[in-house]
Image: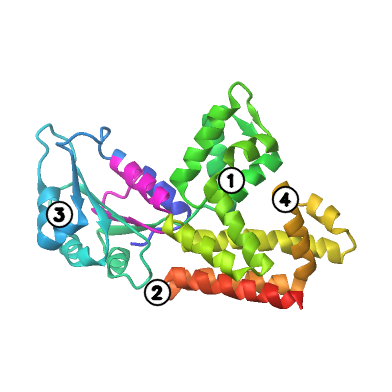
Amino acid sequence: MKITGARIEAFCKAPDPAMRAVLVYGPDGGLVRERVERLMRGVVADLRDPFRVAELPAARLKDDPALVADEAAAIALTGGRRVVVVRDAGDAVAEALGRFLAAPAGDALVVVEGGDLGPRSSLRKLFESADAGAALPCYADDGGSLAAVVQEELRAGGLSADPDALAFLVDHLGGDRRLTRAELAKLVMYMGADRRVRLEDAVACVGDSAALSLDDLTLAAADGDHATAQRVLDRLFTEGSQPVSVLRALSRHFQRLHLAAGLVAAGRTPDQAMAALKPPVIFKAADRFKRQLTRWPPERLGRALQLLLEAEAECKTTGMPATEITSRAVMQLARAAGQARR
């Protein structure tokens, strides 16, 4: 069974008891780990309990395919339902898990932690079609979902945010759920007794190296500096950034350019157009953003946004390497920026 959208949160709170195994996968590794832990805690309160929690590296299942069934059928010495977690799962363990799903043993919940599995993945197909299995995709937070996460974390810390501060946080977080929560926890500590997060607080606390690297990439691509953009992109991938998160960061930058370019076309000056953006352009990038406004007319920006939308769709549906799709999109954007100069 494939579970998507709002149904995922409802399932994590109260999993269908008919589902004996759950695959959690996707490009947002932090969200994958968060949901795996939530599913585990739905069965066992203390995840350090060795009698009720069994962790299996996926590599062990290749050597012993019956191991997952054996663990699922085992009875806890202290009583209570058990949970079995399979870490780092990929297509190599699809056969072993397929045997378990065909004839589930015991009453334990099997939680399978996977990576960024494409639509052609045999493991993903297995869980999406199984009667006793469920597949939960985990994609990077964006838009409304990210705003909800930010507000939830701030409320838990007793904070609220001004609209422009919230917009800044949404624009600079979201690539990885666990990193997002860590950055917001840092912001809660930074605020101290002050309960209202203002834009200057968000900028001072959350402008971390990951966000700056993404800013470096988006600015270089829009400048037409392909060499710098590719160098930053390679670093981001080495550090674990996911292609879809990179494409969405590029889309946010070009959406802001598109909005500002539309205001300029309607008669405003570049400075007035930039001042109208929420959140405002960071002062260090203001000169480059203004130059990009003269380079990118609205119709060319519209084509750039369409290119990025198509690249994200290809990452999710074609089975081609997502890193190569993203690199090609960056090259095309930089080339378009260079053409715009002439």
- Type of residue at label 3? Val
Numbered tag placed on residue 68 in the rendering:
3
Query: Which region is colored magenta?
Result: 14-40
- Asked if 52 appears above or below 227 in the picture, the reply is above
Residue visible at 63% across and 37% down in the picture: 204
Quadrant of the rendering where the C terminus is positioned? bottom right
Place residue 247 in its image quadrant: bottom right
Query: How much space separates mark 1 and mark 2, taking CA atoms?
Result: 30 Å
Give the spatial CA distance, label 1 vs label 4.
Answer: 19 Å
Q: Amino acid at mark 2?
A: Gly
Mark positioned earlier in the residue sequence (1 or 4): 1
Residue matched to label 1: 147
Task: Confirm whether residue 191 shows in the render.
Answer: yes
Pick the residue in front: 55 or 240. 240
Query: At x 67% / y 40%, what residue is drawn?
Result: 165
Number of the label disc, if any, that sits on residue 319: 2
Q: Of callouts 3 and 2, which one flags the residue occurring earlier in the amino acid sequence? A: 3
Q: Nearer the viewer, mark 1 or mark 4?
A: 4
Tag 1: Cα neighbours inside 10 Å, few (<14), some, or many (≥20)? some
The reply to whether residue 282 is visible in this rendering is no
Q: Earlier in the sequence, mark 4 or mark 2?
A: 4
Q: Nearer the viewer, residue 340 or 17?
A: 340
